[in-house]
Image: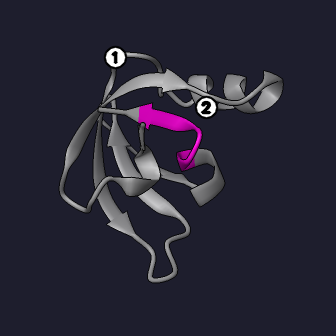
Amino acid sequence: MKTLKEVKIGETARVVKLHGEGAVKRRIMDMGITKGVEVFVRKVAPLGDPVEITVRGYELSLRKADAEMIEVE
């Protein structure tokens, strides 16, 4: 299982599954990160938190803990 946190800068990945429960999972889905969507990793902060991604045509910053809940291929 590969998570969004492990994707390198400049790579594109497809979301396979969202892990997590309740409000956290709902918040990730509300940001446009759903099963099957393409995610492009733009930048990663020096300490790895946050991760800046492009999803559905807009830019988004995610915490490392949230990125670990997103399974990609």
Q: Residue 14 location, x and y as percent? A: 29, 29
Circle number at residue 24: none
Relative side of 41 to 23, left or right: left
Of all residues shown, which one is farthest toward the bottom? Answer: 46
Compare marks 1 and 2 and give the one earlier in the sequence.
Answer: 2
| Residue 25 lies in quadrant | top right
| Residue 26 lies in quadrant | top right
Nearest the eye: 36 or 55: 36
**Is any part of residue 63 visible from this angle?**
no
Which quarter shows the N terminus?
A: top left
- Residue type, label 1: Gly
User: How has the structure been colored for display?
Assistant: one colour
Please report the bounds of the magenta region as a residue range: 67-71
Q: Is residue 40 above or below residue 8?
A: above
Q: Residue 57 magenta-drawn?
A: no
Q: Residue 69 location, x and y as percent? A: 59, 39
The residue to which callout 1 is attached is 36
Nearest the eye: 16 or 46: 16
**Is any part of residue 24 visible from this angle?**
yes
Q: Residue 69 magenta-drawn?
A: yes
Secondary structure under the numbered disc 1 in the rendered image: loop
The residue to which callout 2 is attached is 28
Which residue: 58% across, 23% down?
29
Q: Residue 37 location, x and y as percent? A: 33, 22
- Residue type, label 2: Ile
Q: Is residue 16 above or below residue 65?
A: above
Which quarter shows the C terminus?
A: top left
